[in-house]
C-alpha cells in the first residue's frame, strides 16, 4: 500500500492547479486520472487574462509552439436574427486548445502522477481512504469533472433537483480550402443564443482550428438544436460545409443550480466535480482554477481533514462565488428579467451584448483575479 497525505482524482486544470500550488508544501501528493495526457477535452476553449494571471503563466512562453488566439471582439446574436459585433479595443481573452492547455498545466506539476488509471474503488479504512486497494490517504480531492467518482461518494444533493447542462462540440484543424471559405475570424468568437434562452451555441476559430458547439439544459433536444444551428451557419458561410468527425458530448452543473456538498470527512470537491461553472455562461475553467487555489490555501497547513475543519473551504467558495440558490423556475444561464419578449431586442443592442453578455456574464471583468496562492 502506498501512503500519501493527499490524493487528487482528476488531472485537469483544477487537479493540476491544486497539485502545483501544494507541490512545495511538504505534503506527499498523488494525482490520478483515467486518461493519459495530452488528451482531448470537450470544451470551447478560451481563457481570460484573469485565469492566466492566477496561474502565473507567461503569455509569450505559453504561446510558443501552442495555440494562443488573442480575442478582441465578439459577435453575439439570437438564432434567426442578425448578430451584433463589439470591438473591445484590447485583448479580453485567449483561445486555447484544451489538449495543449491541460497538458501544459500538468507537465509543470512536480508530483507523482498515475495516469491512464481509472478509479475502480474508494473505501474507508482506519480513518483513511483507499483507492483501488493500492493508494491510501487521509484526504481525497475530487477534480474529475461532473462524473467524478469522489463526488459520487458524497451522494446526491439535498433536493436532488440539479439542472445538468449538456453540450456537444467538435474541434478540428481546417484544410486550406476550409480555412479559405470559413467566414469566422480568429479574434472574434461568435455566440448565438437559442430563442428560448435555454442555451447558446458558438463558433470559435483559433488559427486554423475551428471549434463549433452548443449547450442546453434540456438534453433531449440538444441534437435537434445543434443540427439546426450547424445548418444555419453553413448556409451563411460562417463555417465550412464539410465538417469532419462526430460532435462529442459532455455535461456539467451550473453553480446556482448545483446542490452538491463541497466537503465531508476526508473529502473535498473542486472544479466541475463540485458544480462550479458560472451560471450565466457555463464557463468552468476560471471557477476550477480558483477553487483549486482556495482549496490549496485551506489544505496547505492543515492536518485535520474532518468535515468541520474543511468547512472553511465551503465558506471561501460562497464568499467568492456567492451563495447557491435553487430558483423556482429553473432557467439556464440568463436572469428572469431577460426572459421576456424584450430579449430579442436586447440581443440587438451593442450596449447590452457588450456590457452585460460579454463583459459581465462571459468575461467577469468586474471580478478581479484571485491572487496566486503562495507555494511556500
Image (cartoon, helix red, strand yellow):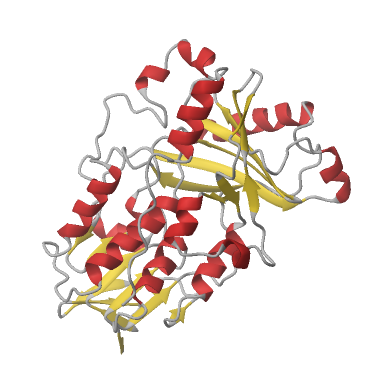
User: Could you tell me which residue is drawn at 34 percent across and 28 percent down?
Assistant: 330
Residue lying farthest to the right in this orientation? 177
Position of 280 compared to 95: left or right? left
Q: Return the residue found at the far top.
A: 341
- Closest to the observer: 86 or 2? 86
- Determine the residue positioned at 79% across, 31% down: 237
Query: Can you give x and y, in whole percent of width and height, for residue 167 in the image?
Result: 53, 42
Point 53% across, 12% down: residue: 345
Q: What residue is drawn where x is 26% and y is 66%? A: 297
The one of 357 and 370 positioned closer to us in this rendering? 370
Q: Residue furthest bottom?
A: 1
Where is residue 227 shown, x and y percent of the image? 66, 32
Quadrant location of the N terminus?
bottom left
Residue 59 in which image quadrant: bottom right
> The C terminus lies in which quarter of the figure?
bottom left
**Residue 369 location, x and y as percent?**
39, 52
Residue 11 visible in the current orientation: yes
Q: Position of residue 30 (x, y in %)?
A: 37, 79
Determine if residue 120 is in view.
no
Q: Measured along the vertical axis of the image, is residue 93 above or below residue 18? A: above
Amino acid at each position: 500500500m502506498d501512503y500519501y497525505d493527499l490524493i487528487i482524482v482528476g488531472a485537469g486544470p483544477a487537479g493540476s492547479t491544486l497539485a502545483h500550488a501544494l507541490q512545495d508544501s511538504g505534503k506527499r501528493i498523488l494525482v490520478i486520472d483515467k486518461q493519459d495526457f495530452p488528451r482531448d477535452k470537450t470544451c470551447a476553449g478560451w481563457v481570460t487574462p484573469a485565469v492566466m494571471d492566477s496561474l502565473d503563466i507567461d503569455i509569450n512562453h505559453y504561446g510558443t509552439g501552442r495555440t494562443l488566439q488573442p480575442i478582441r471582439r465578439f459577435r453575439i446574436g439570437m438564432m434567426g436574427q442578425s448578430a451584433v459585433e463589439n470591438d473591445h479595443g484590447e485583448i479580453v481573452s485567449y483561445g486555447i486548445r484544451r489538449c495543449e492547455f491541460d497538458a501544459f498545466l500538468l507537465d509543470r506539476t512536480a508530483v507523482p502522477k498515475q495516469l491512464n488509471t481509472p478509479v475502480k474503488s474508494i473505501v474507508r479504512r482506519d480513518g483513511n481512504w483507499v483507492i483501488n486497494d493500492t493508494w491510501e490517504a487521509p484526504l481525497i480531492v475530487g477534480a474529475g469533472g461532473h462524473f467524478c467518482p469522489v463526488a459520487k461518494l458524497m451522494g446526491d444533493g439535498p433536493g436532488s433537483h440539479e439542472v445538468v447542462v449538456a453540450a456537444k462540440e467538435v474541434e478540428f484543424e481546417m484544410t486550406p480550402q476550409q480555412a479559405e471559405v470559413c467566414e469566422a475570424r480568429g479574434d472574434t468568437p461568435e455566440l448565438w443564443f437559442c430563442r428560448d434562452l435555454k442555451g447558446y451555441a458558438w463558433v470559435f476559430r483559433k488559427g486554423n482550428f475551428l471549434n463549433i458547439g452548443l449547450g442546453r439544459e434540456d438534453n433531449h433536444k440538444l441534437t435537434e438544436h445543434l443540427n439546426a444551428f450547424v445548418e444555419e451557419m453553413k448556409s451563411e458561410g460562417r463555417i465550412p460545409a464539410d465538417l469532419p468527425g462526430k460532435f462529442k458530448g459532455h455535461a456539467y452543473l451550473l453553480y446556482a443550480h448545483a446542490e452538491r456538498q463541497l466537503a465531508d470527512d476526508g473529502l473535498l470537491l473542486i472544479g466541475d466535480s463540485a458544480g462550479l461553472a458560472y451560471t450565466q455562461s457555463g464557463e468552468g475553467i476560471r471557477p476550477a482554477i480558483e477553487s483549486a487555489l482556495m482549496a490549496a490555501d485551506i489544505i496547505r497547513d492543515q492536518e485535520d481533514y474532518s468535515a468541520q475543519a474543511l468547512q472553511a473551504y465551503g465558506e471561501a467558495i460562497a464568499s467568492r462565488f456567492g451563495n447557491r440558490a435553487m430558483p423556482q423556475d429553473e432557467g439556464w444561464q440568463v436572469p428572469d428579467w431577460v426572459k421576456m419578449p424584450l430579449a430579442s431586442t436586447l440581443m440587438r443592442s451593442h450596449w447590452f451584448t457588450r456590457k452585460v453578455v460579454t463583459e459581465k456574464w462571459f468575461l467577469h471583468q468586474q471580478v478581479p483575479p484571485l491572487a496566486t496562492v503562495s507555494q511556500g
